Image (tube, rainbow, N blue to C red):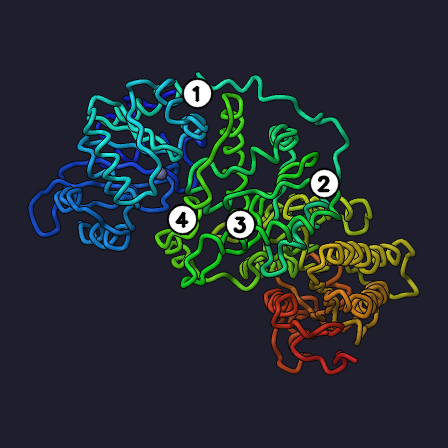
Amino acid sequence: MQSRWSSEAAAGLDPLALRVYTSRLLGAEPSLVLFGGGNTSVKHEAADPRGGVRRALTIKGSGTDLATIGADGFAPLGLDDLIPLRERDVLDDEAMVELVTLALLDTQAPRPSIETLLHAFIPLDWIDHSHADAILTLTNQADGASRVQEVLGDAVGVVPYIKPGFELSRASADVFDADPSVDGLVLDKHGLVTFGETAQASYERHIELVSRAEARIARSWFGPRRSSAEPQSDAARMATTLRGRLSRRRHMIVRSDSSPRVRAFVDHPDVARFAQQGPATPDHVLRTKRLPLVLDSDDPADAPGAVDRYEAAYAEYVREHADPADDFRHDAGPRVVLAPGIGMFTTGRSAAEADAVARIYRQTMDVIEGAESMGGYAALPARDLFDIEYWPLELYKLKLAPPERELAGRVALVTGAASGIGRATAERLASAGAHVFVTDVDGSGAEEAARRICGDGDAAEPLTLDVTDEDSVTAAMRAIALAVGGLDIVVSNAGIADAAPIDALPLTEWQQSLDVNATGHFLVTRAAVRGMRQQGLGGSVILVCTKNTFDPGRDFGAYSAAKAAQLQLGRVLAIENGEHGIRVNMVNPDAVFTDSRLWSDDLRAGRAAAHGVEVDQLEDFYRRRNLLQAPVGAGDVAEAVLFLASDRAAKTTGAVLPVDGGVRGAFPR
Ligand code: ZN
C-alpha cells in the first residue's frame, strides 16, 4: 500500500482540517475501511464554550464514512472528563455513552464513536484506526496473534479480542503502557490502531504496517479451482427465484455479481467450508450477517429450499444466543448468497444497501483467500458476533433511520419514460421509494430522465427499450433480473398518436399505431406477468390507456382502435393473473400536454381541426369540455398510477381509473 500523504496538501492546515485530510486518505482505501468503519481522532487545544481554552479530543462521529468525512463529521470532547474514567473497575455501555456524551463540547456534534475511550486513554495526539484487510488476514487464523508477532514483530502490541467499549479501551491502553515504543496496536480479529505525535507519523505508520502485512500474504496457492469455463447456469433466473423467496415478508433488492474475481472465490471446491466461518471484522456482521448462504446446487429450483434452511438455522442461532426478554429480531434472510458456478447475490432494502453488502463481501473474499493461503481462515465464535449483531449501541442507529417509504424494496419499470406521463410517473414512483427502470426507445432521453431522478435516496436506472421488438423486451427483462432480481410494478405507457380520417389513413400508419399502441403493450405486459409469476410475489401492472377508448373522436381511428385493443388486453390480463396475485389496472387520461412528445405539432393541428378550434385554443378546449373545467397534468396521472401500484389498491384489479377532469362520454363501462 502506498502512502497518499502530500506535504503540499497538508501545509498550513489547522488540527481539525488536518484530521479531516488524513482521515480521508484512510477512507480512500477500500482495503482499509468501508462504510463508516474505522475511526480517527486528534488531541488539541480547543475553545471551551464556557470560556477559555481546554484540551480536547476530537473524534469521528459514530457511523460517519471516512472516505467523505468533513469537519462536521467529528465531535469535540473535553479530554480531562474522559481520562479519569480509566480508573473505573467497570463501566457498562449505557454509562459509558452517558459519560462520553456529557463530555461533549458541542451539543450539535454527531454522536462520538463507540471507541472514544480507546482514543482518550492512549496519550499520543494523533490516532488512526482501521479494519485493514491485510491485518485481518493475519489475525483471522487459528494462531492469529503469533502470526502478527511473526510478521510485524515489536512494531505492534497485540490486544486480545474484546467487544468495543470500556474494557477494550482499557486493555488497549494497558498494552500500550507495557511498551510505549510501539507504532501501533493490533486488535485481534478486529483491526489496527496507529498513533503518533503528528498526523503524518500516525498515518504513515498505518500504511507501513499494512504494507508489511501485505508483503507476507501470498495468494499464489489458493488451491485448485473448479473450471470457470463450465457452462454458467442462468444467473437471471437464479436472481429472480432468490428474490421471490427472500421477499416473502419484505420486498428486497437482489444484486448479482458474476465477475471473474467473484467466480474465482465461489467456484473454489472448499467454499462451503471457508465461507462458513464468519466475517473478517465484527462490524461487518451488521451488513453481511454472520454467514452467507452457500448454495450446493446451481439449479434455481433448489434455491427456495436452501433459503428456508438458512432462515431456520438463523432462527436457531438467535434462539441460542438471544436474551429471552428482548424480542427484537433482524430479518432471518441471508444478505450474501454464494452460488458456485454462477456468482454472488447480495440483498438489501435498496440497491445501495445491497451494493454495500457486495463491496464488503468482496473485501472479505480477499481476507479469506489470504488467510487460507497461509494456513486457514478462522473468524470469531458465533457468540461474539451475535453480541455485535444484537448490540443495543448498534441497534440504536437503526432507530435513528427515517421511516421507510411506501414502495421501499419494490422495483418498477416504466415505458415511454423519457417525457410526459411516463417521466412524471417514473419520478413519482421513485419518490415513493421504488427502484425505477426508466425505459424509452430514445436511450439518451431515458438516461437524462433517470439522471434527474437519482439522488436523495431516489433510485433510477435507464434502459433503452423498443416495446415493439420482442428481443428488446426480453433483453430488458433479463437486464432487470440481473440488476435487482425482478419486478413488482410495470407501467406500460409508451404510445404514439397520429391524426387522420380513416378513408385517408395509409396502411403504414394504421400498422404503426397497432405495433406501438397495442402489440407493444402485449409484449411488455406478457414479459412482465411471466417474470412476476416466476417470482411468486404478485405484482401490479398498470396500462396507461386513454379517454378515447370509451369516447373516441373523429380523425383518430388508428390511435383509438389500437388503444381499445390495449384496454381489452388489460382486462384479459386481469382475468388471467388474479390467481397469481398480479393486479392489472388501467388509467384513462385525457389531453395531457405537460412535456409530452405525443402531442406533436401535427397532432395538435389535426385534433384542432377535428374539433373545429384554433390550434392555440386546443388546450383550453380540452379543459372546458371536462366537468371540473380543469387542465389535466402528467403529475395527476402519475398520482393515479402510484395509487394503483401501491398496496393501497390491494383489492383492485381489472379497473379503469379516468384522469380526465370528468368527461361524461368517457365514464368507464
Ligand atoms: Zn473498529
Give the residue type that dot 1 points to. Answer: Glu
In primary-sequence order, the first of circles 1 and 3 is 1
In the displayed structure image, the side of residue 179 where residue 643 appears, left or right: right
| SS at mark 2 in the image | loop
Q: Mark number for residue 387?
A: 4
Callout 3: helix, strand or loop?
Answer: loop
Q: Is residue 449 visible?
A: no
Residue 37 % position (x, y): 39, 40
Disc 2, ligand 1: is the CB inside 8 Å?
A: no
Going from N to C along the chain, the mark reached first, 4 or 1, is 1
Q: Which residue corresponds to mark 2?
A: 297
- The quadrant the N terminus occupies is top left
Left or right: 252 in relation to 607:
left
* Residue drawn at point x = 46 percent, y = 35 percent: 379
Could you say where residue 431 lies in the image, as x and y percent from the top left?
A: 53, 59
Please say if the residues under marks 2 and 4 sit with CB atoms less than 8 Å apart.
no
Quadrant of ligand 1 in image: top left
The answer to whether residue 559 is visible is yes
Mark 4 vs ligand 1: CB below 8 Å:
no
Quote the CA–CA distance across marks 4 and 3. 36 Å
Q: Residue 166 in the image: x percent, y percent?
A: 25, 44
Point out residue 91 in the picture as x, y percentages from the top left corner. Answer: 23, 50
Q: Do the numbered discs 1 and 3 sit on residues whose CB atoms are within 8 Å? A: no
From this view, report whether residue 583 is shown above or below residue 400: below
Q: CA distance from mark 1 to mark 2?
A: 35 Å
Q: Does the beta carbon of the residue at mark 1 sit less than 8 Å from ligand 1?
A: no
In the picture, the disc for residue 454 is 3
Element type at mark 1: helix
Q: Pointers 1 and 2 in contact (CB under 8 A)? A: no
Q: Nearer the viewer, mark 4 or mark 1?
A: 4
Q: CA distance from mark 2 to mark 4?
A: 32 Å
Residue that appears at 54% across and 20% down: 219
